[in-house]
Amino acid sequence: MKAKSSAIGYYVPEQIIDNKFIAKRYDIELKSVYARSGISTRRYVTTQSTSDLAVEAINNLLSKTSVQKSEIDCLLLGTITPESFAPSTATIAIQKLQLNNAFGMDLSAACSGFCYALELGKMYI
């Protein structure tokens, strides 16, 4: 069976921080921050949790489609910053969203977590 992505949801926190913030916070040279990461600005949260970010992204996705919450049966959440190891952040998001027919799991694979989630989702389909 073939699988395809039919919509993408996202959430971007409002606060932006630059490399000066990172260099100062972690006491490293400013030039090395970009050299090591290739990133010049990031989004930053102080009051939201990882599951809050996931909920915002999922709600954004649902607003673009005709999919109902009751149709969601699996939530794969790629994160390197889980709220806890048990319960998983995915199951916390499931509870917040009231996805009563879904199970979920976190995929802790750093930057490649998105790719891992896509592959695992394809296998579940």
Image (spheres, grey):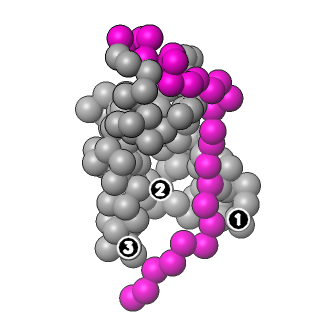
Which-is-in-front pick, marks 2 and 3?
3
Using the image, tell me which numbered label, if any, was put on residue 122.
Answer: 3
Query: How many discs appear?
Result: 3
User: Sequence-wise, which precedes: disc 2 or disc 3?
Assistant: 2
Judging by the rendered image, the residue that carries numbered circle 2 is 101
Which residue occupies 57% across, 40% down? 55
Q: How far across and how far down the image is residue 82, in percent?
A: 35, 33
Quarter location, residue 52:
top right
**Part of the protein shown in magenta:** 1-27
Which-is-in-front pick, marks 1 and 2?
1
Tag 2 and tag 3, C-beta contact below 8 Å = no
Answer above or below: position of 16 versus 69: above
User: Sequence-wise, which precedes: disc 1 or disc 3?
Assistant: 1
Q: Is residue 20 magenta?
A: yes
Badge 1: how crowded within 10 Å, few (<14), some, or many (20+)? few
Q: How far across and how far down the image is residue 75, in percent?
A: 43, 54
